[in-house]
Image: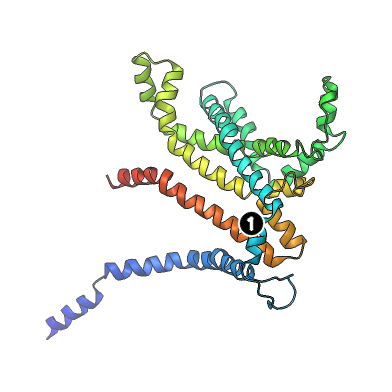
Amino acid sequence: MRQSLHSVLLWVRRPRPKLRRRAELFVLLSPATVLFLGFVIAPIGIAVYYSFYSWNGYGPLTDFIGLKNYSDALSGTVFHTAVQHNVELVAFSLLLQLPLIVALALLLNRRMRGRSVFRLVVFAPYLLSEATAAIVWTLMLSPDGFVDKMLRSIGLGSLIHGWLGDPGIVFYVLFVVITWKYLGFGVILLLAGLQAVPAELREAAAIDGASSWQATRMVVLPLLGPTIRIWIFLSVIGSLQLFDLVWIMTLGGPAHASTTMVTYMIDHGYRGNEYGYGSAVSVVVFVICFAFALAYQRYVLRRDTDGALTRAAG
């Protein structure tokens, strides 16, 4: 009798791995899941719901208009201009920023005097908040500001323009500021990727007679591919969602010359008291970003993640 009772107690006290694992997952994932549902999924659902109404932000939702907000947004010329600006930002980032970031990362990865200082100088702008950077550059680019005085001091006063007031150049001026602000993040990201490139591979390429450029092109850059693809993903998503710098510096003007999809959304939704219409624009922006993220993950990043999982399993 005592032996049977003892065996029963041992069975009751026996750990249950599956149940314990599920309980641990539930305890650890519940806070993050609640936050994700409350601050990501719920706002998206609310925005979709508001987008079917003509609502000025006051009173109950009573004027149901269906898909009219979406049709107005997708057929509006100003919104088309905003989408075009975001697409141009993506193109400029890939064609201009990426080569510059790769070149700076390769340069700052070499052993040279003052390398830490140069790295700090490149990365420092990224540490500034968008609001601080925008205000500083607005003051520098204002009429008779620092940029104008500097050009006059070196004899290039003929190049002075209304940097933030000329519709023909304001978008390109903003791109220069954006590049200055986010260049350091890309350089640090690629420097981290370069640390994972074995030095033995470069030495082997040098022994085989490869020049420094050939070793970089044939050995280093292919191994840096996953890091570059991650930067491209972050850069494209950031370009599609760009708001802070543009809004503070130009409010999307002059004459919509620098407007983006998000500044257009804020301008019409918040400032124009068209919250239903602004919600529809936000849903369109979300769908564009989500579709790109899914396609990029499916066709570009999948082989990187599959390779990482294979190496981890091995």
Residue 148 shown left or right of residue 108 in the figure: right
Query: Does 188 sit above or below residue 83?
Result: above
Q: Position of residue 264 (x, y in %)?
A: 70, 54
Query: Does 42 sit above or below residue 251?
Result: below
Residue at horizontal 55 percent and vertical 33 percent from the top: 98
Query: Does 264 sit above or below residue 174?
Result: below
Find the residue positioned furthest to the bottom. Answer: 1
Residue at horizontal 82 percent and vertical 20 percent from the top: 154
Q: What is the quadrant of residue 45 in the picture?
A: bottom right
Looking at the rendered structure, the secondary structure element under dot 1 is helix
259 or 232, nearer to the observer: 259
Residue 142 shown left or right of residue 183 in the figure: right
Please name the amino acid that badge 1 sits on.
Answer: Leu
Total labels: the figure holds: 1
60 or 301, nearer to the observer: 60
Residue 164 shown left or right of residue 52 in the figure: right
Q: Quadrant of the C terminus?
A: top left
Mark 1: give few (<14), some (14-19) or many (20+) Cα within 10 Å.
some
Q: Give the residue number, with chain letter if any, for mark 1.
A: 74
